Image: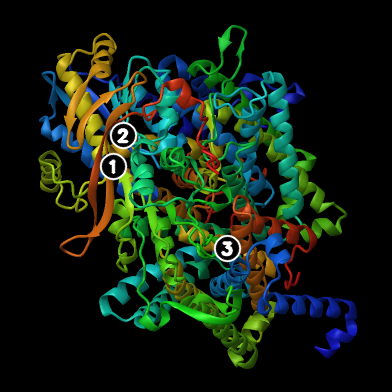
Amino acid sequence: MFRFAKYTLAAAAALTLAAPAMAQDTVKMGALATLEGAFTVLGEDGMRGVRLALEEAGYMAGGKKIELITGSSDASPDSAIRATRKLVEQDGVQVLIGPLSGSEGLAVKDYAKTQPNVTFLNGTSAAQDTTLRNPAPNFFRFSTDGAQWMAGLGEYVYNEKGYRKVAVLAEDYSFPYTQVFGFLEPFCRLGGKAPIDARFWVPIGNKDYSSVIAALPDDVDAIYVALGGADAVNFLTQYEQAGGDLPLIGGSIPVDQTVLGSKGRTRDFVIGTPSAGPVSDTWDDPRWSAFVQAYKKQFPDGFPSPSLFAHGYYINTKAALLALDKVGGDLSDGGAKLRAELSKLEFETPTGMVKLDERRQAIADIFLTEVIEGPDGNLLNKTIKVIPQVEQTFGLPYDKFLAYGQVGRENPTCE
Amino acid sequence: MRQFVERHTFWAIVIFLAVAVLAWLIFAVWPDWLEAAIGRKKTFINTLLNGVTLAGLYFLVASGFTLVFGLMRNVNLAHGSLYLLGGYLGYEVAEASGSWFFGLAVAFLAIAGAGVLMQVLIFRRMEGDDLRQTLVTIAISIIAADIMLAIWTGTTYQFAPPEWLFGAATLPVVSVLKSSGDPVFIKYPVYRLAVLGTAVAVGIALWLFLNRTRVGMMVRAGVNDRHMLSATGINVPLLFATVFAIGAGLAGFAGVVGGTALSIAPGEDVRYLLASLIVVIVGGLGSVPGAAIGALLIGLAEQFGLAYFPTYGVVLTFLIMVVVLAVRPQGIMGTR
Amino acid sequence: MDARQLFSGNLSLADVHPGVALTVVFLLAYPGFASDFFVFQIGAYSLILGTISLSLMMLAGYGGMVSLAQLTIAGIAGYLVAILGDNSVGVMGLGWPWWLTVPAALLAAVLFSTFIGAISVRTDGIYMIMITLAIAVAFFYFVRQNYVLFNGFTGFAGIEPPTLFGIYWRDPVPFYYLSLFVAAGFFWAVRYAARSTYGLSLQAIRDNPRRMRALGYDVTLHRIVAHILAGVIAGTAGILLVWFNGRISPGSVGIDVAIDILVIAVVGGLRHPIGPFLGAIVFVLLENFAIDLIDRERFNTVIGVAFLLVVLFSPDGLLGLFNRIRSQVQLGRRTRLEAGRPATGGRNVVGSIEQN
């Protein structure tokens, strides 16, 4: 019986002895996304973004061939760390793109600090603290964070729509906290109000909004909804069924393609909801159209339009490839030259120019949108305005912005 | 009832008073001090109704679970997967045929069939080994969840119930009085009331089945003493298969009913499994009236928790379970 | 080899089965030839998971109680290390030294497992799965919603073991030896306890509680003590786990991980303490390398099917499978099963987990 165990372990040991034979003219690039569990669909789109960028560059950068190794997590930080550790320590990647979700990003950033010779770029993780507090010197985020995604929305609903008092309905965890913060900070600075007892933080995965709908105050002008995927679809149906008629303001996820494209009753109710985010399906700029065409051509079975996940992964991968080009694929110094190049990289993406700030966080354009019904009956986001070059501190100096404190249920207070 | 009043006079008075207070809360217009103390009447009434309708849904799911356990001592932890599968199948059939009711019927029959298959092919070989059966159901639930994820992906599916079930109904309950003195009535989704009605109907049907038919008599006898049942010459495998079919069919049926109210997505299987577990632990394993009481308690607790204490509301139902376990481990209506 | 011989002073090298000796040598020498990744993420992690599953195996195999809350107990110990010690998130982190946090965390784990034992042993064995499942989920929800103590969804990061005797214990090799020491210690302890008076009474209670009650044994107390012992094992493993990950969050104690622990214990084999460790190694290897061999997406189906096959055809898991193959091929040497009864050719037929 023990011999059996011994043989298994011996086989495992034999696997470890095979040192990864690395050809000198190949660069190993790892990509980490949520390819398991309920977020698989999003992770797959992220991977499509990676492949799109690689295909565009012909899988070559700086004169060297790029070998892509994929890693999978199930959106929990523990599994992300294990997958990252495998990619870095076992598969020997020198550049890692990922992860997808916010809490995974925080964990990967902590891990990056223990691997100074590997260069980490973000996928789409959008937690503020990944680059705002205790950033890692080798973690680069060319995609914007959850608070940046809300840029322009607070001002728009205050000035153009005339809302003065809003209720908030969001899930009770860090990403919605960040989105609510990004929306309320400018809204409250202008004089808007969002009373604490009109903020409804529902548990993740909660499907039953009937009680929350019943508790919604009557004297608010609109409801800011930052729910994800299934939850958003449920809320919208139940709100309509309960005869609710308050206008909505959307976070980035409730009106993302994954929700607007959900099967079942058409979301007529949602038409006219303003929102903001890093992408806009209907932007008529040639850069965006070219990107959508390339996506559709390479992935005929993908989404009707690339989601913000494909977009985020694409931009980060492209940044890595451009920087590799600049250093001629030379990673012999542990990637120090590569990271120096990344810090000063500034390039054109399908959604505008991107560059990094001093904590390696992206400064990029954000889109203010409103939901409309497309020509073939499906719902789309119409671009109202492009908010140019948003910084993670919204233009404030770092110490003033950090004084707001970490995002939470009551930040900002804004009574 | 008279016996109950005579024997437990104190509790009878308490219950009567509680019912009277509840009736007043529902039908009277609330004075200002009450609104200041516990919030608006609309919230309260809605939460109460939500709790009761959710209890109906939980009863539909949990009754199948408790029936299977009561007779066959099989803790079917794949019950949630049956729910979800019923939802998905019902959705596909409803979309393909255009009739929601047809989808509902197919879901019931298909999942009942699946239940019979599970009982005949797998559980029959393990009769008597409860632990092993439970582990098998866990394995089935893992596999089923993953395969359903592969087929239907992580998207959320929303059903399209028939038009006459959609929309809000106006109830004869006053919410507030407008400044002009006109009453504002409370609106409530028709569909949820329909769910409640269905649950009551199913409950009555189950009661009739268990208490007024021969098969029901056999089931009750089997719940009491399985070995004597087989000793009396009844075709036990057939009975077990029938009961499993009913239990599973109820789960599938609930899948379509619940899915229409609350949509279908991966993770619902775990959620309804847990809900069934708590409902039957609280109500008593093997008892259908217990499932009704447990469902009512848990449904109300969940909704009131969500409305009034959203942060820790989720833990409230588990707290109730722990209290019941500490005080009366066999559940409210359970027999040792 | 009889564990009691270790303590009786009569043990000589000739008594040791060569397979055992080889395994011991292999485990000790492992860091010598394996890469850091294999030592840390495969070796140490398997040992930690194996230890948590060992606590489940002890309860299920010897006590007849399948508890899905062992991971929760490990989680409580882990969370307390984060709360009472240092963390980088800025919540709690009272800064106690390790020689205070570790015992405190263990104490909390023991208290919680006593609580779980107390409320779940008064009912039938099957209830235990349901009740512990519900408790595990309740704990998950609670730590996800509470920010004051447990920092909710984000959890804690930056948790590190101390630097003792000049060694930083999270370096791959020292951590591996630490995990090995802990795992081996509990392994021998469980083997020893299984043959002790208490262990034999517990197994008798598993087989027929009514008879034991009639004989005058306090069945409830025996079961609660089993939970306490399992709590010590799971709690220690939980402390190691939080040091391994360097972080802990609600996802670490979620229901899918708890089911994984059950799968590991059952697939490995519930009859002998080596079973959970075998199961853990297979699980960890699959988890890390499945993506290279097959589509990672269907990982759960693979696990589920393996679990199903094991429960249907080989209730003793990999161990039982191996034993059956061995007895079929007639490898000569008569093996002694843990109950002390000799094995013969057709003995290991498909049967109940509960039967011996």
Amino acid type assigned to the residue bearing label 1 in the image: Phe
Chain under callout 1: A
Asked if marks 2 and 3 fall on the same chain, the answer is no
Residue A290 located left or right of residue C337: left
Q: Residue furthest front?
A: B180
First in residue order: circle 1 vs circle 2: 2
Q: CA distance from mark 1 to mark 2?
A: 8 Å
Per the image, label 1 sits on a secondary structure element best described as: helix
Name the subunit of mark 3.
B
Q: Which quadrant holds residue A91?
A: top left
- Tags 1 and 2 touching, CB below 8 Å: yes
Graded by Cα atoms within 10 Å as few (under 14), some (14 to 19) or many (20 or more), the crowding at tag 1 reads: many
Amino acid type shown at disc 2: Gly
Element on which disc 2 rests: loop
Q: Residue at x 23, y 30 (%)?
A: A317
* Mark drawn on residue B275: 3
Task: Please determine if labels 1 and 2 lie on a single subunit.
Answer: yes
Front position among marks 2 and 3: 2
Q: Residue C215: give x, y in percent of width and height.
A: 86, 56
Mark number displayed over residue A123: 2
Q: What amino acid is found at the position of numbered circle 3 in the picture? A: Ala
Quadrant of the rendering where the C terminus of chain A is positioned: top right
Q: Residues within 10 Å of mark 2 (few under 14, many from 20)?
A: many
Checking the image for residue A138, the label placed there is none
Q: Is residue C202 visible?
A: no
| Residue C43 visible to an observer of this rendering | yes
The x, y position of residue C16, in whole percent, is: 60, 25
In the rendered image, the vertical position of residue B33 relative to residue A362, given as above or below: below
Residue B25, given in percent of the width and then of the height, sits at 70, 74
Residue A273 higher or lower than B336, as above or below: above
Q: Chain of mark 2?
A: A
Q: Are marks 2 and 3 in contact (CB under 8 Å)?
A: no
